[in-house]
Amino acid sequence: MQIYLPIAEMPVNVLTILAMGGAVGFLSGMFGVGGGFLMTPLLIFLGIPPAVAVGTQSTQVVASSMTGALAHFTRKSIDFKMGGILLIGGVAGSISGIYLFRVLTRIGQIDLVISLVYVLFLSVIGAMMMVESVRAIRAARGGVIPARRGGHHSWIHGLPFKMRFRRSKLYISVIPPILVGFFVGMLSAIMGVGGGFIMIPAMIYLLRMPTNVVIGTSFFQIVFVTALTGVMHAYTNFAVDIVLGFLLVIGGVIGAQYGVRAAEKLPSEQLRALLAAILLLIGLRLGFDLVTTPDDLYSVVDVAPHR
Amino acid sequence: MKTFPAYRLALALAFVVLAAGTVRADQLVTDLSAHQIAIRSNFTGTEILLFGAVEARTPGARALNRDIVVVVQGPNAPAMVRRKDRVGGVWVNHDSVTYPDVPGYYAVASTRPLEVTAPPETLRALRIGIENVDIGVAEARAIDGTAQALMPEQENAFWKALIRNRQRDRLYSNVPGGVTFLGQTLFRATVDIPANVPVGLYTAKVYLFQDGEVVDTISSPLYIDKRGIERFIYRAAHSDPLLYGLLAVLGAAFAGWLASAAMRRT
């Protein structure tokens, strides 16, 4: 069943999009990730213009992170003060990211930059996850518990503008969370992702936040930053396709339900290794496309009126 | 048979010509199967049928060396062609050439290949065939955005690439044999309209050639536009982008809330 997308200006198969949304939603429910870093490249492979893929994907991330944030709100596992500080950085990052996106579109390098950023992040994160899950699988077999971080003081404690975060039991400078938020906001605008895969490790290892508030707080920040990103992509690039977004959300919501249930039954470390393999494959494919000689060196773009 | 405006026009013209007393060669009467194409949510491309007849002015004359050429042309817009070059092992968009007036759609169908229909000068003068269309003055730029001068043959490579790209997207086509005669006077042609056509005002022009010379032309409009929900969404996204964006995001947030509410219940 084909449907014509009004903003992407192309027909797509409804079932393909629903299946993609469902599969990515399944993985995101299973691993507690947003799934944006899987969906955006898939949409681009399908032939959706990169700007529309990124802009539309951000609305899907709003929906999935909203569900996540609400679940953590009822469990009271959100540090709102820390979330607010991360959000300040995120808003600034998202606005800068949108600006950068426009400049790159005008000079014709946006596709290249999206691909490069994806290759970098997918391969680094895929490799890290792979190493970690293989180590965990081995540890489970050998019964050895991998060593954990110590409690030593880091350079972060030397920074000014300290603030007390009661929920996280922290007294740290606001500079690192603002920078983390900024970086993630920028990625959200350029890649159409929530950025949890960067923010969560940064909160744990850099800010030393307690793990029980990390995911909830990251969802809280992501809802607002991707909402802003989505509105700005719609406003500056006309790049949000409501029809496509709707299909992705439907697929994602259904997939996520099954993903959460499946995660309780299946061996999580093996699945994590599988996800790592998927990330590495997508990264490799994108990287391969960057270095192999294209079929046609020339490409045509309509010169859209600039705002 | 239904009377079409184009048919009436042709008749009126015939009377004018008769009244003037100038005995001319054959004349065309044509029409399209549709003058409007609506892009709705189920649009996956379509076909338009162009049909017509050659009205012989001298009864009994043989229709030898008679050719029909149909040109359907879409709205003009600026288009930029970029060429990739390898920079540090990675293929990067490098030089670009912008043409100000490029048809978004250009389809030619003819009874015989264009080369044998008319001499190249004639085709060029009539601007038949995509390579004969006037696309304005090209503007070449380097990767850093500075203007640069290109040799004509270099620039031509960009123009050729534009045609090649649009042919691949089925936006430009040339179908020799795409016009078929049914007997001596009736002819028909089907023109492929792919799903990715630009919206706007199109013209379908029909040329009647006799021995390589144009003896008659007729032109009819064709309007392609988004309709229904497609039109509504596209309009909203472009005329009220802020409101549209807010609604899209609020809708998504609502869907997320709905999902969590549903999850809590189960």
Image (spheres, grey):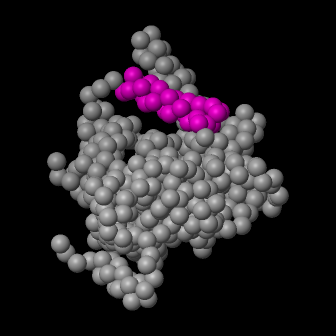
Q: Identify the residue at image location x=50%, y=59%.
A: B211
Is residue B61 shown above or below B94? below
- The part of the image, by quadrant, that contains residue A4 is bottom left
* Quadrant of the frame with the C terminus of chain A: bottom right
Of residues A254 and B63, the one drawn nearer to the viewer in this rendering: B63
The rendered magenta stretch, by its main secondary structure, is classed as helix
Q: Identify the residue at image location x=33%, y=39%.
A: A23
* Residue B201 x %, y %: 44, 73
In this rendering, position of residue B51 left or right of residue A160: left
Q: Is residue A272 magenta?
A: yes
Q: Identify the residue at image location x=19%, y=75%.
A: B2
| Stretch in magenta | A268-295
Q: Identify the residue at image location x=81%, y=53%.
A: B151
Q: Look at the image and tell me whether residue A305 can be seen.
A: yes
- The part of the image, by quadrant, that contains residue A94 is bottom right
Q: Is residue B91 magenta?
A: no
